[in-house]
């Protein structure tokens, strides 16, 4: 019964995230930013070390372009690499409406690095870098 309740909670959480979040980037380092792109085009970058949040709003054209490059991802299967350096936890993932699930673009866990096996993931990562440069370089800074 317990596993059933956990799986139901996870499904409800995934439905909730699917409706709200398009992309998330997070890490556990003190100076690591957390970036979220919501489905309405709002971009939020927050920091754990006391720096103020930055926010931006994507244009409809850029939002549609991002959704298009995400839709080209054809698998959620990941590949694993092992490195000699122990890294902090780090995660970048997008929600694919076409696949109806989260796709891991890159994830670091200790010495393990996981990446999606989809060839199109590099296109998504490049487009996300463009989005963050464009909208967060001159973003509104908000004090919490």
Image (cartoon, rainbow, N blue to C red):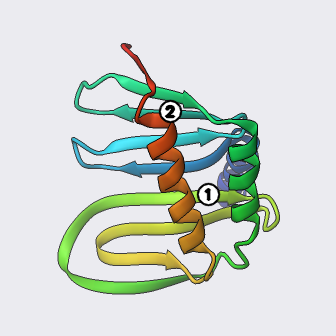
Quadrant for residue 91, please give it.
bottom left
The extreme left residue here reads 85
Residue beneath the point at 29% across and 45% down: 32
Q: Residue 60: horizontal and vertical position, in percent?
A: 75, 38
Q: Residues within 10 Å of mark 2 (few under 14, many from 20)?
A: many
In the displayed structure, 30 sits above or below 44; it is: below
Quadrant for residue 68, please give it.
bottom right
First reached walking from the N terminus: tag 1 or tag 2: 2
Q: Residue 73: horizontal and vertical position, in percent?
A: 70, 73
Instruction: Give 5 or 62, whichever is nearer the viewer.
Output: 62
Please give the label number shown on residue 44: 2
Residue beneath the point at 37% across and 86% down: 81
Instruction: Give 110 or 133, whichever is nearer the viewer.
Output: 133
Judged from the image, the secondary structure of the residue bearing numbered disc 2 is strand
Residue beneath the point at 59% across and 50% down: 23
Residue beneath the point at 62% across and 66% down: 103
Image quadrant where one finds the N terminus: bottom right
Quadrant for residue 46, please give it.
top left
Instruction: Give 80 or 65, whichever is nearer the viewer.
Output: 65
In the displayed structure, 85 sits above or below 69; it is: below
Any part of residue 34 in sight: yes
Judged from the image, the secondary structure of the residue bearing numbered disc 1 is strand
Distance between the alpha carbons at the discs numbered 1 and 2: 15 Å
Does residue 128 appear to the left or right of 61 in the view shown? left
In the displayed structure, 62 sits above or below 98; it is: above
Q: Residues within 10 Å of mark 1 (few under 14, many from 20)?
A: many
Instruction: Give 13 or 82, whichever is nearer the viewer.
Output: 82
Q: Residue 39: horizontal and vertical position, in percent?
A: 71, 40
């Amino acid at each position: 019964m317990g596993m059933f309740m956990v799986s139901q909670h996870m499904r409800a959480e995934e439905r909730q995230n699917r409706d709200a979040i398009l992309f998330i980037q997070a890490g556990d380092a003190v100076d690591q930013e957390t970036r979220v792109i919501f489905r309405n085009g709002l971009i939020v970058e927050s920091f754990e070390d006391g720096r103020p949040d930055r926010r931006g709003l994507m244009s409809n054209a850029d939002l549609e372009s991002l959704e298009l490059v995400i839709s080209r991802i054809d698998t959620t299967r990941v590949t694993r690499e092992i490195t000699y350096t122990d890294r902090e936890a780090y995660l970048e993932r997008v929600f694919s409406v076409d696949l109806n699930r989260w796709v891991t673009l890159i994830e670091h866990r200790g010495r393990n690095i996981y990446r999606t096996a989809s060839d199109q993931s590099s296109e998504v990562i490049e487009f996300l870098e463009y989005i963050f440069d464009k909208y967060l370089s001159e973003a509104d800074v908000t004090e919490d």
